[in-house]
Image (cartoon, coloured by chain):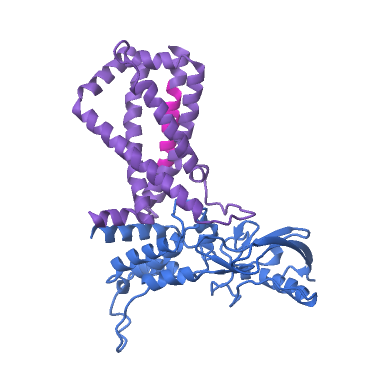
Amino acid sequence: MSWLVKTLSTSVGKKLVMAVTGLFFCCFLVVHLLGNLTLYKGMETFNGYVDHLHALGPLIRVAEVLMLVFALVHVTTGLMLTYQNYMSRPVKYQMNKSGGGRTLGSATMPYTGIVLIFFVIAHLLGFHFADHETQTVYDIVSHAFSDPVVVGYYVVAMLVVAVHVSHGFWSAFQSLGVNHEKYNPAIKALALVFSLVVGAGFGLIPVYMSLFI
Amino acid sequence: MTKTINLTLKVWRQKNSQAKGNLETYSAKNISTDMSFLEMMDVVNETLILEGKDPITFDHDCREGICGMCGAVVNGRAHGPEKGTTLCQLHMRHFSDGDVVVVEPFRSRAFKVLKDLMVDRSGLDQIIQAGGYVSVNTGGAQDANAIPVPQKIADKAMDAAECIGCGACVASCPNASAMLFVGAKVSQLALLPQGKPEAKERVVSMISKMDELGFGNCSNERECEAECPKNISIENIARLNREFIKAGVK
């Protein structure tokens, strides 16, 4: 086991940890979005989807535990990297300009990441840990999104997710060593499409719910 | 006719590695636009010497863009605003009359400022000493064509070998990471048959040396690639990651 710990605790190892856990969450976003799209078909379809999901029983528990562990690893490694990177230049430049490499996503990774920690906690408290005895999940969703403040907050949070994954998705491939002149344009295009789909896909749901339900 | 310009320089002055430095203002008058940035600095230094002041210390050697000795952060950019250019090859025609130019040393925890713009980049040498070589037995040289190397691979290895070890990647990286340097040095050897036998030990020891010296972590910001005077691609960082994964699982 020590070779694994030793490998993953190096600078490149930590990148690999961020890449693998990050891609895992990208996959989760796809599954979560596909499930959420059932909201457009109305209450019965959505509650039916929720019932199907809960019927998986132990599998859901395993997925939840895995996500919690991955989230803790992703967040602690990310915070550690941010701290180490900040410390790696004790005297800052008086004048600092970009040579054109950075993007909005890459330059804001730690900040969007920190915002997302708070968002995920609030989201879990509002939905996952809400009272599921007296109300269906659809009731929780439609009630939450009847408040324009909540809708606005969710839309902003989804934009933050889109910015975070716009760098994270491409970056994960680079970290895993997947950089090939033939496939780079496709990976970059996929990263852009992915961040747009995630941002628009999740972001439009609260708007739709507040306007049409 | 030669065009001349006048500039205001704000240069980082620091007596020694312990001293606290600060930006000092100098005027550079009647600078020919045909001069290189370092020649402009020479003119300023001659004026300082005539005034009985301490000239600005900066590193330089070949002044042909191939030795990797020069380098400073000019107006927030490593080696100045031109792409694929070392500081000695940056010409004053890229500046305008009346410009204010801020000149600072390359900054990283691993690069100690020795004096003014001169920094200790021996950390990069230590990384090379940790594994950036091939062990070759002495004896008669073997036939040049004995080990066939595809042209494409040879070209990639040569592209990586263009790295002059100036440290601009570290200076321009928001995290002061040396990943592009290490990526290039690992790649130039890993791509060729001669580098394969020691590939695993090389990548592991070079990365652990880099971490030990206090360079930052790479977060794929691509600033290194944008500022590298030799246009080294981050493809080499991906190869470094691949080599590291291979070494880890083997």
Q: Position of residue B164 (x, y in %)?
A: 50, 70
In depth, the one of B175 and A103 nearer the eye is: B175
The shade of chain A is purple
Residue A151 image position (x, y, % from top left): 48, 20
- Name the quarter where the N terminus of chain B is drawn: bottom right
Q: Residue at x 24, y 22 (%)?
A: A54
Q: Is residue B90 magenta?
A: no
Q: Position of residue A37 (x, y in %)?
A: 35, 23
Q: Is residue A39 above or below residue A167?
A: above
Q: Which image quarter is the C terminus of chain B in?
A: bottom left
User: Which stretch did the figure color magenta?
Assistant: A190-205
From the viewer's side, name the closer residue of B70 and A132.
Answer: A132
Assign the magenta stretch its main secondary structure: helix
Residue B160 vertical placement versus A192 (above, below): below
Report the residue at 47% width, 58% height from top.
Answer: B177
Does any portion of residue A38 appear in the rendered image? Answer: yes
Vertical arrangement, residue A28 with respect to residue B248, above or below? above
In-image side of A58 versus A96 (left or right): left
Left or right: A77 with respect to B77?
left
- Identity of the residue drawn at 69% across and 60% down: B23
* Chain for colour blue: B
Find the residue positioned furthest to the front: B18
Q: How many marks?
A: 0
Asked whether residue A197 is drawn in magenta, I would say: yes
Query: Residue B4, located in which quarter of the rendered image?
Result: bottom right
In the picture shown, does residue B229 fall above or below A12? below
Q: Image quarter for residue A36?
A: top left
Where does the image place residue A63, in percent across and percent down from the top left? 25, 33
- Res A188 seen here: no
